[in-house]
């Protein structure tokens, strides 16, 4: 699984809101959208694509924790967290190294420099409930 992260500030900029980051216009966002479409299409053509989803902004999230055995719900965004999961791809490929190569291609996405400076993705194997963890 390839996990992409962002922040509420990133979502605000992509929604055209000025804040800590300059607002992005539709023209700014168009190359990113085109890149993501091409990225998914390439994975489909290679047979490695399984699934992808983008997630809504953290302001729409809720966190559920237990406190003294009682669920406590907190609406987002969360002051203690800068980055949140923004979206993911599930790929099925020959190796962990290949999944890492695929994730590295996300660095080619044409984004404004201030967004690129904080962008990252994690690559994690999906646990199929094996007896031994995949390493």
Image: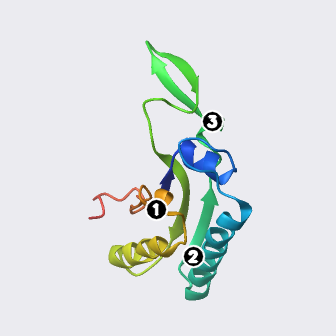
Secondary structure under tag 2 reads strand
Q: Position of residue 82 (x, y in %)?
A: 45, 40
Position of residue 17 in the picture relative to residue 99 (left or right): right
Q: Residue furthest bottom?
A: 45
Q: Quadrant of residue 8?
A: top right
Q: Are marks 2 and 3 in contact (CB under 8 Å)?
A: no
> Which mark, residue 49?
2
Q: Can you say which quadrant of the picture contains the C terminus?
A: bottom left
Q: Nearer the viewer, residue 61 or 81?
A: 81
Q: What residue would you read off at disc 3?
A: 59
Q: Position of residue 119 (x, y in %)?
A: 44, 58
Which of label 2 and label 3 is nearer to you? 3
Secondary structure under tag 3 reads helix
Residue sitting at x 53%, y 42%: 20
Report the Cα–Cα distance between label 2 and label 3. Answer: 29 Å
Q: Nearer the viewer, residue 79 or 67?
A: 79
> Which mark, residue 116?
1
Q: Nearer the viewer, residue 20 or 14?
A: 20
Residue sitting at x 64%, y 51%: 23
């Amino acid at each position: 699984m390839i996990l992409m992260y962002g922040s509420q500030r990133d979502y605000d900029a992509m929604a055209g809101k000025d804040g800590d980051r300059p607002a992005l216009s539709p023209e700014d966002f168009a190359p990113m959208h085109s890149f993501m479409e091409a990225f998914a299409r390439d994975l489909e053509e290679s047979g490695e694509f399984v699934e992808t989803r983008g997630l809504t902004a953290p302001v729409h999230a809720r966190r559920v924790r237990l406190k003294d055995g009682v669920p406590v719900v907190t609406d987002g965004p969360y002051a203690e967290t800068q980055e949140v999961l923004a979206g993911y791809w599930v790929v099925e490929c020959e190796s962990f190294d290949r999944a890492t190569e695929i994730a590295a291609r996300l660095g080619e996405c044409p984004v404004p420099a201030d967004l690129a400076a904080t962008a990252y993705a994690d690559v994690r194997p999906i646990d199929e409930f094996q007896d031994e963890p995949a390493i």
